[in-house]
Image (cartoon, rainbow, N blue to C red):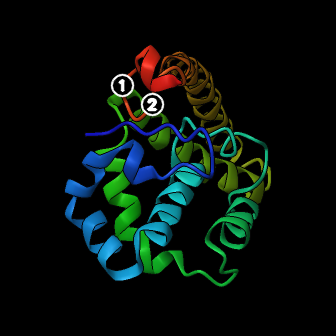
Amino acid sequence: MARLFIKSLEDDIFEMYPQLMLVSDYADLIEELGREKAGNILKGIYFIYDPKSDLKDSGMSRQELVGDINKNLIGDEEFDWDEYDYLVQTYLKVSLNKVEKVVARYEEELDGFDALLKSWKWTKKDASAKAGLMAKYNTMSEKLIELREKVKVGKEDMSQSYGGYNKSLIESM
């Protein structure tokens, strides 16, 4: 389906990627909330979960990013993402290529490892287990860096296109 790349908050995501309206979950969301709100939710998913998102890799925590997206894009500081988790899953299934899916999975795994390692105190009893987890964490981190480079190259290619195709000279005017 469509690999998204959001260049501007003002872009109508459904104009750029009309094939998204073929996905039942998205079509139902447009019908329920209207095109603009549905588009903003999809943009929010892009910024929070898509490996191509610059905001996702900005150094902000996911919680901070979600708060800013809720306030400044969706316009509802109390927006309940749990209610729309099915859209996140649809997005990840439909809008990421295989490498991006692996990146997303690695990032989720590393977040879990990171939380566990931060809460795990060093003891003589657990030292080898924690060291093993740290080694696995480091290996996965190195692999993630390699994979992100592949995503970056693909993103640079996509930045030249509009909605998945390159505009002709006349369309660009």
Amino acid on which the number 1 mark rests in the picture? Tyr
- Check disc 1 and report the residue beneath it: 165
The residue depicted at 49 percent of the width and 67 percent of the height is: 36
Q: Relative to the observer, which residue lies in front, 36 or 98?
A: 36
Q: Position of residue 148 (x, y in %)?
A: 56, 25
Q: Residue at x 48, y 42 (%)?
A: 104
Location of residue 106 in the rendering, given as x and y in whole percent from the top left corner = 50, 38
Residue in the foreground of this view, choosing between 52 and 63: 52
- Please say if 24 is above or below 148: below
Q: Where does the N terminus fall, quadrant-wise?
A: top left
Q: Residue at x 55, y 81 (%)?
A: 80
Give the left or right position of residue 92, taking residue 19 as reference. right
Using residue 114 as the reference point, say whether residue 144 is left or right of it. left
Asked whether the residues under the numbered discs 2 and 1 touch, taking CB atoms below 8 Å apart as contact, a structural biologist would say yes
Give residue 51's mark: none
Q: Regarding mark 1 in the picture, which secondary structure is present there?
A: loop
For residue 145, above or below residue 31 = above
Q: Quadrant of residue 105?
A: top left
Q: State the residue in front, 18 or 132.
A: 18
**Badge count:** 2
User: Which amino acid, by three-letter code, is at mark 2?
Assistant: Tyr
Categorize mark 1 by other alpha carbons within 10 Å: few (<14), some (14-19), many (20+): few
State which quadrant residue 110 falls in: top right
Can you identify the residue that label 2 sits on? Answer: 162
Work out how far the residue at label 2 is from the one at label 1, CA to CA, in angstroms: 5 Å
Tag 2's secondary structure? Answer: loop
Mark 2 neighbour class, 10 Å CA radius: few under 14, some 14 to 19, many 20 or more:
some
